[in-house]
Image: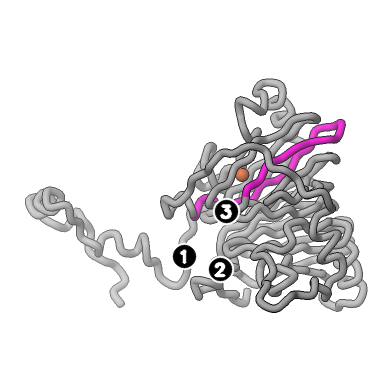
Amino acid sequence: MGETLGTLEELPQDYRDDMARAGVAPLWPMMRNVLPHGSPQPKTRAGYWNYQAVRPLLIRAGELTPVEKAERRVLVLSDPGRGAGAMQATASIYLGLQLLLPGESAPAHVHTPSAVRIIVEGSGGYTVVDGEKLPMEEGDLVLTPGGEWHDHGHEGSAPVVWLDALDLPLFVYLEGSYATEGPLQAQRNRPDASQVEYLASGLAPTRRAGVGPRRYPMMRYPWVRTEAALREMLAYGGEGIAELDYINPETGADVLPTMGFTAMMLPEGGVHEPPLRSSSAAFHVIKGRGKTQINGELFEWGAKDTFTAPVFAEINHQADMESFLVRVHDRPLQDRLGYYEERAR
Ligand SMILES: [Fe+2]
């Protein structure tokens, strides 16, 4: 394989002009841009968002812009590699911090991308998905899969903030992203599936012949249960970290086709150096304090902060106190495309 390929400048001007007129271009001067050797060259750069710095801006958005004028009152977390205003935090993951004030509601809509909410602060907020009312308590993970109607409401007395993670960049790239508006949904008069059908892991409702489960049977993952499970895992595991993947309780598959979610617990003083992964990631700190080095760049984080890592990043986590994080990643999509990979450091 040749090391250096011919450049555009090496070609005669008349040939370049003729090519442009004919609507064609030579591949070889551009080939390394799209097929670099050995590993991808991500545009994404590691990012860090301090919640205490962003929170006042979000609260001010609540004063400046009524929810009716915003539909979704969100501050977008833009990838530093793409600059402010970029509608993505990594190549495939969009992140935004959303504010809902007491008494407000966000109108119902349905769209092609899937969304997941991780609740950052507040109490009394809820999301209705397909008629099911899903409470939003701190640390809960709530799914609104693509194609499912959803709206948000707030019965509490203080601001509710959550982190939205969407596979929006993928749908924008595919020119497949759009939404449809509708009236607020009627709510089924019962608790959500995590409290009814899937109260205990390993148990699912008995099926009648020919009646399958819903595609997304459980759309809320209460944090209290996740934390309790992580604590037991760490107490009896020997690797210095506990990790649990959020899965569909009926199939064991990832909760969404494109995005995956992994809850992590590090003990005080715990160090974690994962393999280099072909997936990009966002880390949201549920609670704790520590530091993470991503490709040599140091980020000191605390509760409710968020940081991101590009593909194949060298990541070193260190917890200064007992810490819980949720890792959002695109491994499920890469699995489907058949190229997910982990490399030794
Ligand atoms: Fe939405």
Judged from the image, the secondary structure of the residue bearing numbered disc 1 is loop
- Residue furthest toward the left? 14
Towards the viewer: 50 or 86: 86
For the N terminus, which image quadrant? Answer: bottom left
Label 1 amino acid? Pro
Residue picked out by circle 3: 147
Q: Please identify the quarter of the rendering in which residue 220 is found.
A: bottom right
Q: Is mark 3 within 8 Å of ligand 1?
A: no
Specify the segment rendered in magenta.
Answer: 149-170
Which is more foreground, mark 1 or mark 2? 2
Disc ID at residue 278:
2
Label 3 Cα neighbours within 10 Å, binned few <14 / some 14-19 / many ≥20:
some
Q: Is residue 73 left or right of residue 231?
A: left
For the C terminus, which image quadrant? Answer: bottom right
Q: Disc 2 to disc 3, how far (Cα)?
A: 28 Å
Q: Can residue 270 be seen at all in this image of the molecule? A: no
* Of pointers 1 and 3, the one earlier in the residue sequence: 1
Up-down relation of residue 134 to residue 260 (above or below)? above
* Of pointers 1 and 2, the one earlier in the residue sequence: 1
Q: Is residue 230 magenta?
A: no
Residue picked out by circle 1: 40
Q: Please identify the quarter of the rendering in which residue 11 is found.
A: bottom left
Q: Can residue 282 be seen at all in this image of the molecule? A: yes
Q: Is residue 85 left or right of residue 129?
A: left
Residue 274: x, y in percent?
69, 70
